[in-house]
Image (spheres, helix red, strand yellow):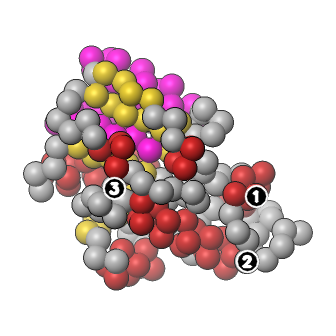
Amino acid sequence: MIPIRSFTDAKARLADVLEPATRAEIAHRMADTVADAAAAMRVVVVSSAAEVEEWATDRGFEVISDPGSLDAAAVAGREHLRAVGCHRAVIAHADLPHAQTLAPLARDGTQPIVALVPCHRDDGTNVLSVPVDVPFEFAYGPGSFRRHVAEAHRLGLGVRVVRAPDLAVDVDAPNDLHHVDLPVPLP
């Protein structure tokens, strides 16, 4: 599952250094990279933005409506995947410029294990894999990696931390932009 709020309004935290059109282009390219990394899986995009829905449909992905927050999007995606018979939800952020494959996050199948990829700052959760039949409470935002590990322990689930270099880098702040091929130079 890939939650994407918007391409056109993406990466507002980068507004001081990048114009809206450049941010949208970078967001679109990174989403393509993450989608390619998920190619071997059933892909569901959670969004209510017309340009994202069109992109997802053109790629042959299922689209479900964004309920308004990242945590709620993860719940909606997990519930959708459970309803269509999947055993595991792999939630991947769309801002992973080096993503190559998400397959290692799905390998636990029906096992009572939560697999997580922490961001390169060991703070956020770039990719999270959970069984669909447990009431895992998502807690994205700063410090989410530790909260997600604590939630897995609270539910009695095993934890598998995946240190995948291609999935660890996300683009949240201006100092992350060196990981992206920019169409224009930074000011």
Q: Which residue was labeled with disc 2?
A: 183
Q: Which residues are magenta?
A: 127-156
Residue 4 or 88: which is nearer the viewer? 88
Give the secondary structure at mark 2: loop
Magenta stretch: includes residue 55:
no
Taking the image as drawn, is residue 5 in sight?
Answer: no
The amino acid type of the residue labelled 3 equals Met
Residue at horizontal 25%, vertical 60%? 42
Q: Which residue was labeled with disc 3?
A: 1
The residues bearing labels 3 and 2 have C-alpha atoms spaced at a distance of 28 Å
Give the secondary structure at mark 3: loop
Q: Are marks 3 and 2 in contact (CB under 8 Å)?
A: no
Give the secondary structure at mark 1: helix
Q: Which residue was labeled with disc 1?
A: 178
Between circles 1 and 3, the one closer to the viewer is 1
Judged left or right of residue 104, residue 29 is right
